[in-house]
Image (spheres, rainbow, N blue to C red):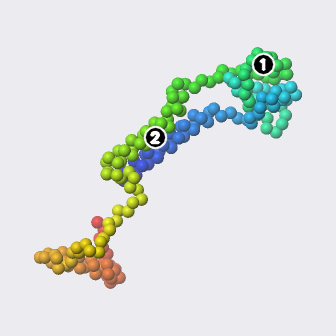
Amino acid sequence: MKQGYKTILLWILLIVMFISFYFHLFSGSQQQGRAVTFSEFWQAVEQDNVRSVTIKGDEITGEFMRGENRHFRTRALLTDELIRDLKDHRVNVVVEKEEENPFWQSALLSWLPMILLFVIFIFFMRQLQAGGGKAMSFGKSKAKMLTPNAKRVTFADVAGVDEAKEELQEIIEFLKNPKKFSRLGGRIPKG
Protein backbone atom coordinates (compact mmCIF):
# COMPACT_ATOMS: atom_id res chain seq x y z
CA MET A 1 0.00 0.00 0.00
CA LYS A 2 1.38 3.42 -0.87
CA GLN A 3 2.33 5.82 1.91
CA GLY A 4 -0.29 8.38 0.79
CA TYR A 5 -3.13 5.89 1.14
CA LYS A 6 -1.92 4.89 4.61
CA THR A 7 -1.94 8.52 5.72
CA ILE A 8 -5.43 9.14 4.35
CA LEU A 9 -6.70 5.92 5.92
CA LEU A 10 -5.19 6.93 9.27
CA TRP A 11 -6.87 10.36 9.16
CA ILE A 12 -10.23 8.83 8.24
CA LEU A 13 -9.89 6.34 11.10
CA LEU A 14 -9.04 9.11 13.58
CA ILE A 15 -11.99 11.24 12.47
CA VAL A 16 -14.40 8.29 12.75
CA MET A 17 -13.05 7.52 16.23
CA PHE A 18 -13.52 11.12 17.37
CA ILE A 19 -17.05 11.28 15.97
CA SER A 20 -18.06 7.97 17.54
CA PHE A 21 -16.58 9.01 20.90
CA TYR A 22 -18.40 12.35 20.70
CA PHE A 23 -21.76 10.66 20.01
CA HIS A 24 -21.09 8.07 22.71
CA LEU A 25 -20.78 10.84 25.30
CA PHE A 26 -24.08 12.38 24.22
CA SER A 27 -25.98 9.10 24.00
CA GLY A 28 -25.66 8.47 27.75
CA SER A 29 -27.74 11.55 28.60
CA GLN A 30 -30.77 10.50 26.56
CA GLN A 31 -33.57 8.95 28.60
CA GLN A 32 -36.10 6.36 27.53
CA GLY A 33 -39.82 7.08 27.38
CA ARG A 34 -41.97 9.69 25.78
CA ALA A 35 -41.86 13.28 26.94
CA VAL A 36 -44.98 14.54 28.72
CA THR A 37 -45.77 17.92 30.21
CA PHE A 38 -45.85 18.32 33.96
CA SER A 39 -49.61 18.94 33.76
CA GLU A 40 -50.14 15.59 32.02
CA PHE A 41 -47.93 13.91 34.61
CA TRP A 42 -49.81 15.49 37.52
CA GLN A 43 -53.18 14.60 36.02
CA ALA A 44 -52.03 10.96 35.81
CA VAL A 45 -50.89 11.11 39.45
CA GLU A 46 -54.32 12.40 40.56
CA GLN A 47 -56.02 9.60 38.60
CA ASP A 48 -53.74 7.04 40.33
CA ASN A 49 -52.24 6.07 36.97
CA VAL A 50 -48.56 6.39 37.97
CA ARG A 51 -46.82 3.27 39.28
CA SER A 52 -43.34 4.65 40.03
CA VAL A 53 -41.11 7.66 39.45
CA THR A 54 -37.39 8.25 39.59
CA ILE A 55 -36.32 11.81 40.31
CA LYS A 56 -32.84 12.86 39.28
CA GLY A 57 -32.21 16.59 39.57
CA ASP A 58 -35.09 18.29 37.78
CA GLU A 59 -35.85 15.31 35.57
CA ILE A 60 -38.61 12.86 36.44
CA THR A 61 -38.84 9.50 34.70
CA GLY A 62 -41.40 6.89 35.50
CA GLU A 63 -44.00 4.36 34.49
CA PHE A 64 -47.75 4.66 34.06
CA MET A 65 -50.01 1.84 35.29
CA ARG A 66 -52.20 1.88 32.20
CA GLY A 67 -51.75 2.95 28.62
CA GLU A 68 -49.97 1.95 25.48
CA ASN A 69 -46.64 3.69 26.04
CA ARG A 70 -46.09 3.32 29.79
CA HIS A 71 -42.66 4.92 30.21
CA PHE A 72 -42.50 8.72 30.38
CA ARG A 73 -40.23 11.60 31.26
CA THR A 74 -40.90 15.17 32.35
CA ARG A 75 -39.21 18.01 34.23
CA ALA A 76 -40.09 19.57 37.58
CA LEU A 77 -38.34 21.01 40.61
CA LEU A 78 -38.03 18.58 43.49
CA THR A 79 -39.92 19.85 46.54
CA ASP A 80 -41.07 18.23 49.76
CA GLU A 81 -44.66 18.96 48.76
CA LEU A 82 -44.22 17.08 45.46
CA ILE A 83 -42.82 14.01 47.21
CA ARG A 84 -45.58 14.12 49.86
CA ASP A 85 -48.30 14.33 47.17
CA LEU A 86 -46.74 11.42 45.26
CA LYS A 87 -46.64 9.32 48.45
CA ASP A 88 -50.31 10.20 49.17
CA HIS A 89 -51.24 8.72 45.78
CA ARG A 90 -49.22 5.55 46.49
CA VAL A 91 -46.53 6.25 43.90
CA ASN A 92 -43.21 4.49 44.43
CA VAL A 93 -40.65 7.33 44.56
CA VAL A 94 -36.89 6.92 44.07
CA VAL A 95 -34.66 9.98 44.36
CA GLU A 96 -31.23 9.60 42.78
CA LYS A 97 -28.27 11.91 43.00
CA GLU A 98 -27.78 13.88 39.83
CA GLU A 99 -24.70 12.76 37.95
CA GLU A 100 -22.21 15.51 37.47
CA ASN A 101 -20.11 15.45 34.36
CA PRO A 102 -16.43 15.34 35.24
CA PHE A 103 -14.42 18.38 34.28
CA TRP A 104 -12.45 16.52 31.60
CA GLN A 105 -15.67 15.34 29.95
CA SER A 106 -17.23 18.80 29.72
CA ALA A 107 -13.93 20.29 28.59
CA LEU A 108 -13.56 17.61 25.93
CA LEU A 109 -17.09 18.14 24.66
CA SER A 110 -16.61 21.86 24.33
CA TRP A 111 -13.07 21.78 22.89
CA LEU A 112 -13.24 18.67 20.68
CA PRO A 113 -14.67 20.40 17.57
CA MET A 114 -12.08 23.19 17.78
CA ILE A 115 -9.21 20.73 18.25
CA LEU A 116 -10.43 18.68 15.29
CA LEU A 117 -10.60 21.78 13.06
CA PHE A 118 -7.13 22.82 14.21
CA VAL A 119 -5.67 19.39 13.37
CA ILE A 120 -7.25 19.47 9.90
CA PHE A 121 -5.88 22.99 9.37
CA ILE A 122 -2.36 21.88 10.37
CA PHE A 123 -2.64 18.85 8.06
CA PHE A 124 -3.49 21.03 5.05
CA MET A 125 -0.79 23.58 5.87
CA ARG A 126 1.84 20.81 6.00
CA GLN A 127 0.62 19.48 2.66
CA LEU A 128 0.87 22.94 1.12
CA GLN A 129 4.43 23.43 2.40
CA ALA A 130 5.62 19.97 1.43
CA GLY A 131 4.47 19.66 -2.12
CA GLY A 132 4.03 23.08 -3.62
CA GLY A 133 0.25 23.10 -3.49
CA LYS A 134 -0.50 19.38 -3.57
CA ALA A 135 -3.16 19.64 -0.86
CA MET A 136 -5.75 21.22 -3.15
CA SER A 137 -4.61 19.60 -6.41
CA PHE A 138 -6.86 16.54 -6.30
CA GLY A 139 -8.89 16.23 -9.47
CA LYS A 140 -6.35 18.09 -11.57
CA SER A 141 -4.92 16.34 -14.60
CA LYS A 142 -1.19 15.69 -14.77
CA ALA A 143 -1.22 15.57 -18.56
CA LYS A 144 1.00 18.03 -20.43
CA MET A 145 -0.32 20.20 -23.21
CA LEU A 146 1.45 19.83 -26.54
CA THR A 147 1.52 22.90 -28.68
CA PRO A 148 1.53 22.47 -32.45
CA ASN A 149 4.42 24.90 -33.00
CA ALA A 150 6.73 23.19 -30.46
CA LYS A 151 9.96 21.81 -31.88
CA ARG A 152 9.60 18.11 -32.68
CA VAL A 153 12.47 15.65 -32.49
CA THR A 154 12.74 13.24 -35.43
CA PHE A 155 15.00 10.29 -36.28
CA ALA A 156 17.09 12.57 -38.44
CA ASP A 157 17.96 14.64 -35.33
CA VAL A 158 19.53 11.63 -33.59
CA ALA A 159 23.04 11.30 -34.92
CA GLY A 160 25.33 8.32 -34.52
CA VAL A 161 23.13 6.11 -32.31
CA ASP A 162 21.82 3.55 -34.78
CA GLU A 163 20.72 1.08 -32.07
CA ALA A 164 18.47 3.66 -30.43
CA LYS A 165 16.95 4.47 -33.83
CA GLU A 166 16.21 0.80 -34.53
CA GLU A 167 14.63 0.24 -31.10
CA LEU A 168 12.40 3.28 -31.44
CA GLN A 169 11.37 2.24 -34.97
CA GLU A 170 10.40 -1.21 -33.63
CA ILE A 171 8.30 0.37 -30.87
CA ILE A 172 6.57 2.64 -33.35
CA GLU A 173 5.88 -0.29 -35.67
CA PHE A 174 4.46 -2.28 -32.73
CA LEU A 175 2.18 0.61 -31.78
CA LYS A 176 0.97 0.95 -35.38
CA ASN A 177 0.38 -2.78 -35.93
CA PRO A 178 0.27 -4.72 -32.61
CA LYS A 179 -1.47 -7.79 -34.13
CA LYS A 180 1.60 -8.60 -36.19
CA PHE A 181 3.76 -8.88 -33.06
CA SER A 182 1.17 -10.44 -30.75
CA ARG A 183 0.68 -13.27 -33.26
CA LEU A 184 4.36 -14.11 -32.78
CA GLY A 185 4.03 -13.76 -28.97
CA GLY A 186 5.68 -10.38 -28.72
CA ARG A 187 4.64 -7.81 -26.16
CA ILE A 188 6.07 -4.62 -24.71
CA PRO A 189 7.90 -5.38 -21.48
CA LYS A 190 6.66 -3.63 -18.37
CA GLY A 191 9.01 -1.37 -16.50
Q: To which residue does mark 1 refer?
A: 83
Whichever of callouts 1 and 2 sits on the residue coming sooner in the sequence is 1
| Residue annotated with mark 2 | 117
Q: Could you say where residue 142 lies in the image, as x and y percent from the top left?
A: 35, 62
Give the image quarter of residue 38. top right
Dot 2 lies on which element? helix
Q: Position of residue 22 (x, y in %)?
A: 54, 37
Amino acid type indicated by mark 1: Ile
Looking at the rendered structure, the kind of residue marked 2 is Leu
Q: Residues within 10 Å of mark 1 (few under 14, many from 20)?
A: some
Residue at (18, 75) in percent of width and height = 164
Give the residue displayed 70% in from the left and 27% down from the top.
Answer: 59
The quarter of the displayed image where residue 70 is located = top right
Instruction: State whether residue 61 is above or below residue 178.
Output: above
Q: Is residue 54 visible?
A: no
Q: Residue furthest top?
A: 80
Q: Is residue 63 toward the left or the right of residue 98 in the image?
A: right
Q: Residue at x 57, y 26 (%)?
A: 101
Answer yes or no: is residue 10 visible. yes
In the rendered view, does 170 fall on the left or right side of 119?
Answer: left
